[in-house]
Amino acid sequence: MTTPRIPLVEPPYPEAMQQDFDRVMRGLPPLNIFRTVAHNPRVLSRMVAGGLLDKGSISLRQRELVILRTCALCRAEYEWGVHVAAYGAKAQFTPEQIAATVHGDAVTPLWSREEQLLIALCDSLQRRQDIDDALWSELGGVYSEAQLIELLMLAGFYQMVSCVVNATRIEHQTGTPLFPAKA
């Protein structure tokens, strides 16, 4: 277990900070990531305002697949576990699919063809920070331009979140899973 580099902000929270927590947590206690970022209230406010967890142009399952794969590729176990705990069942992922977000590849038969393309998108962005023409063409055959923009922004946002949680060594959130062991 690593020691967090920045301690969590402790309650009571200033009113504006509490409002930011409420906006993103909807009455639940703030997650460790938000209590860490809260050391800079302006950044916290921008972070919660800029999130992509609302109903967008892609399904919850597509959104969470991109988030889980991106966090796994970035080795951001904290954020991966938070999303598995909060959304894994809602996205109807099987235990095998959740494990495959960490250890699988884009051609595993656990995923539909559309989902395999999302994994390939995440893999390419992580490896090259770009997508080659062939993959872009395949993605464009399945996803609209609005969806492609959302997918790219989502992957980029969670690469940023992964950098923050990894660099600050945010303590694992109680009640969330760790990466599964490789089978």
Image (spheres, grey):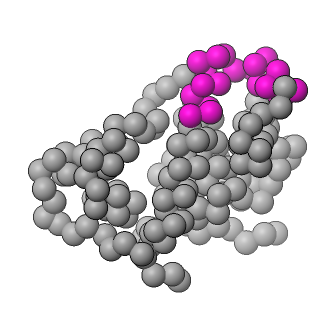
154 relative to 38 in the view: left or right: right
- Asked if residue 148 is among those painted magenta in the image, a careful observer would answer yes
Q: Point out the stretch of residues depicted in magenta.
A: 134-153
Depth check: 56 or 73 in front? 73
Q: Residue at x 69, y 20 (%)?
A: 143
Q: Is residue 24 among the parts visible in the rendering?
A: no
Q: Position of residue 163 (x, y in %)?
A: 54, 58
Is residue 85 depicted above or below 46 in this figure?
below
119 relative to 165 in the view: left or right: right
Q: Residue at x 37, y 72 (%)?
A: 6
Which quadrant of the structure image shows residue 99? bottom right
166 relative to 42 in the view: left or right: right
Depth check: 182 or 132 in front? 132
Q: Quadrant of the C terminus?
A: bottom right
Q: Is residue 56 among the parts visible in the rendering?
A: yes
Is residue 173 depicted above or below 116 in this figure?
below
**How many labels, in total?**
0
Q: Residue at x 82, y 21 (%)?
A: 137
Which quadrant of the structure image shows residue 24? top left
- Asked if residue 149 is among those painted magenta in the image, a careful observer would answer yes
Is residue 129 depicted above or below 83 in this figure?
above
Q: Position of residue 173 (x, y in %)?
A: 44, 67
Q: Position of residue 135 (x, y in %)?
A: 83, 29
Which quadrant of the structure image shows residue 138? top right
Prevailing secondary structure class for the magenta stretch in the rendered image? helix
Q: Position of residue 27 (x, y in %)?
A: 24, 49
Q: Residue at x 64, y 16 (%)?
A: 145
